[in-house]
C-alpha cells in the first residue's frame, strides 16, 4: 500500500509539505477524542491538496461501516485504517468491518500482545472467513485494553522492536509505527526489516502541526535505510 505514511495531517498546507518531503501516503484522523481528529469537511479540503499518486487513508476506531463509508465518500479516501481494539467492549473494530467497507481496502492497526500476534492472526483469519481480509497491518505501540479511542495512536510510545521480530510473519505487508522519528526510523528499519513506516507525533512541532524539516528528514532517513539494506 505505502512505504512512508505521514499520519494525523490536519491542513492542506501540511499535506502538500508531506508529499514534497517524500511521503507516498497521508493519514487523516477521524477518531473522536484524538487531538488530530478532523471533520469530514476539513478532511475533504486536505485530501483535495494531494496528487493522485499519493494515498489518502482515513483512520477510524469503533466507527460503524455506514459512518466510514459516508466519510470515505465525502472526503475521497483511497483506503480505511481500522485503529480500534481487536476485541473488547469499547472502540472495537470487528473482522467483519473489512467486508462491510469493501471495495475500499482496509489497513489494520495492531499491537503486540502477551502472546505476540496470536490475537492479530485470529482477527485476520476471521476477516478472511467473512469475505475480505485486510491488505496491510500497521504495528503500533501497545495500549491498555481499556484505552479510549482518542488514545489509541499518535502517543509517541515505541513498539518493542525485538518482540516484533520474535512475533514472526503475518502473511501480509507490514508497516511499523509507534514513536518513530527522524532520529530512530533508520535504526527501526534495520532492527525489524520493516518495508513501510508510519509516523504522526514524530514529525510534529505540536499536536497536529507538522514540521517540514522533520518530515523531510524522516523520509530521507527511511529511504536511506532501505537503500542500504538493498546493498
Image (tube, rainbow, N blue to C red):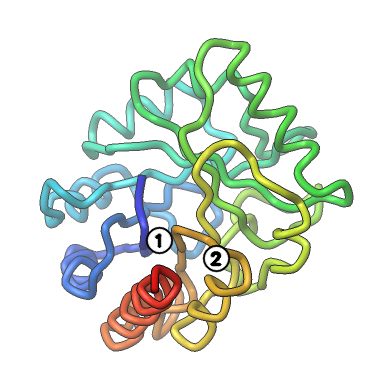
Counting from the top left corner in percent of width and height, residue 94 is at: 64, 26
Residue 175 appears left or right of 148? left
Categorize mark 1 by other alpha carbons within 10 Å: few (<14), some (14-19), many (20+): many
Which quadrant of the view contains residue 62?
top right
Residue drawn at (56%, 55%) of the image: 33
Whether 130 is drawn above or below 35: the answer is: above
Whether 96 is drawn above or below 5: the answer is: above
**Circle count:** 2
Counting from the top left corner in percent of width and height, residue 65 is at: 47, 22
Q: Compute the Cα span from label 1 to label 2.
A: 8 Å
Whether 142 is drawn above or below 118: the answer is: below
Of the 4 image quadrants, the one containing the C terminus is bottom left
Residue drawn at (30%, 55%) of the image: 25
Residue 2 appears left or right of 198? left
Whether 51 is drawn above or below 102: the answer is: below
Residue drawn at (70%, 51%) of the image: 111
Instruction: Mark 1 and mark 2 in contact? Answer it, CB < 8 Å.
Output: yes
Which quadrant of the view contains residue 71?
top left
Most distant residue in the right direction:
114
Counting from the top left corner in percent of width and height, residue 154 is at: 55, 65
Q: Tag 2 or tag 1, which sits nearer the N-term? A: 1
Residue drawn at (69%, 68%) of the image: 161
Residue 7's mark?
1
Amino acid at each position: 500500500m505505502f512505504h512512508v505514511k505521514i499520519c494525523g495531517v490536519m491542513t492542506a498546507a501540511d499535506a502538500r509539505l508531506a508529499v514534497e518531503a517524500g511521503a507516498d501516503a497521508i493519514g487523516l484522523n477521524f477518531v473522536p477524542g484524538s487531538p488530530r481528529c478532523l471533520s469530514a469537511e476539513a478532511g475533504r479540503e486536505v485530501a483535495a491538496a494531494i496528487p493522485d499518486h499519493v494515498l489518502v487513508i482515513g483512520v477510524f476506531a469503533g466507527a460503524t461501516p455506514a459512518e466510514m463509508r459516508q466519510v470515505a465518500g465525502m472526503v475521497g479516501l483511497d483506503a480505511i485504517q481500522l485503529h480500534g481494539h481487536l476485541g473488547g467492549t469499547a472502540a472495537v473494530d470487528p473482522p467483519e468491518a473489512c467486508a462491510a467497507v469493501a471495495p475500499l481496502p482496509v489497513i489494520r492497526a495492531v499491537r503486540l500482545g502477551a502472546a505476540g500476534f496470536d490475537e492479530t492472526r485470529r482477527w485476520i483469519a476471521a476477516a478472511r472467513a467473512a469475505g475480505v481480509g485486510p491488505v496491510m497491518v500497521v504495528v503500533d505501540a501497545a495500549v491498555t485494553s481499556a484505552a479510549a479511542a482518542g488514545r489509541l495512536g499518535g502517543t509517541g510510545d515505541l513498539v518493542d522492536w525485538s518482540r516484533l521480530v520474535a512475533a514472526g510473519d503475518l502473511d501480509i505487508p507490514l508497516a511499523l509505527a509507534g514513536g518513530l522519528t527522524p532520529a530512530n526510523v533508520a535504526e527501526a528499519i534495520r532492527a525489524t526489516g520493516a518495508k513501510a513506516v508510519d509516523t504522526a507525533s514524530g514529525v510534529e512541532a505540536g499536536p497536529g502541526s507538522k514540521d517540514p524539516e522533520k518530515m523531510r528528514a524522516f523520509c530521507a532517513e527511511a529511504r536511506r535505510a532501505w537503500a542500504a539494506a538493498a546493498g
